[in-house]
């Protein structure tokens, strides 16, 4: 009879643990990488322009796609970079690369981002900017509606 009592007590303890009543984070499974991203409205630039984003020696380039309303380019940084300030260069060139249409440089401070909630992996460091012909690169608030 003693083993039935022990077994009867173990089951509710396991059930409570599985229901999240124990102090464990409730994590989702969203993936993320550390990095910098620049977005723009395609109608602000020529449809076949070349867009180039750099931070330090890391660069990524893409060509405009006419049917996109919004576009962007991002570069990946090491996940252990932390809350560093990193230089950012963003240029827009003509399709053949002979003319620079837009060129801006700034320094951004990477912000901690835990897409699955506090206490859950991954924890990454990111910055987002918006480019428009009449402005400098403008920081984008991740939490803004």
Image (tube, rainbow, N blue to C red):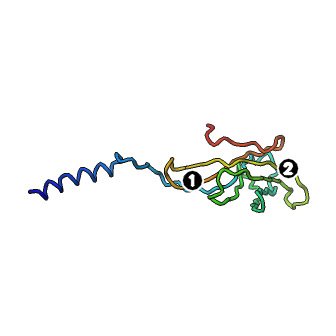
Where's residue 48, x and y in %? 81, 56
Nearer the viewer's eye, disc 2 or disc 1? Answer: 1
- The residue tagged 1 is 123
Please give left or right for residue 71 compared with residue 1 in the image: right
Q: Nearer the viewer, residue 88 or 99?
A: 88
Seen as rendered, the residue at the extreme right is: 98
- Quarter containing the C terminus: top right
Mark 2, Cα crowd under 10 Å, few <14 / some 14-19 / many 20+, is some
Please give left or right for residue 101 compared with residue 114 in the image: right
Earlier in the chain: of badge 2 and badge 1, it is 2
Where's residue 112, x and y in %? 61, 48
Q: Nearer the viewer, residue 111 or 137?
A: 111
Q: Is residue 144 above or below residue 126?
A: above
Residue found at x 84% / y 59%: 95
Residue found at x 17% / y 53%: 8
- The residue tagged 2 is 102
Please give left or right for residue 26 compared with residue 62 in the image: left
Cα–Cα gap, marks 2 and 1: 33 Å
Residue found at x 55% / y 49%: 115
Residue found at x 77% / y 53%: 87
Q: Nearer the viewer, residue 57 or 128?
A: 57
Which structural element holds mark 1? loop
- Quarter containing the N terminus: bottom left
- Mark number displayed over residue 73: none
Please give left or right for residue 9 compared with residue 36 in the image: left
The answer to whether the residue labelled 2 contacts the one labelled 1, judged by CB atoms less than 8 Å apart, is: no
Seen as rendered, the residue at the extreme left is: 1
Question: How many numbered circles does the render carry?
Answer: 2
Which structural element holds mark 2? strand
């Amino acid at each position: 009879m003693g083993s039935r009592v022990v077994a009867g007590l173990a089951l509710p303890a396991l059930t409570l643990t599985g229901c999240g009543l124990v102090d464990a984070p409730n994590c989702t499974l969203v993936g993320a990488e550390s990095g910098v991203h620049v977005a723009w409205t395609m109608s602000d630039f020529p449809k076949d322009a070349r867009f180039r984003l750099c931070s330090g020696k890391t660069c990524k380039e893409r060509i405009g796609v006419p049917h996109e309303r919004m576009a962007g380019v991002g570069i990946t940084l090491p996940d252990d970079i932390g809350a560093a300030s990193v230089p950012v260069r963003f240029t827009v060139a003509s399709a053949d690369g002979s003319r620079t249409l837009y060129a801006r440089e700034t320094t951004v401070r990477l912000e901690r981002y835990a897409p699955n909630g506090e206490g859950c992996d991954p924890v990454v460091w990111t910055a987002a900017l918006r480019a428009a012909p009449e402005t400098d690169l403008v920081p984008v608030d991740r939490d803004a509606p």
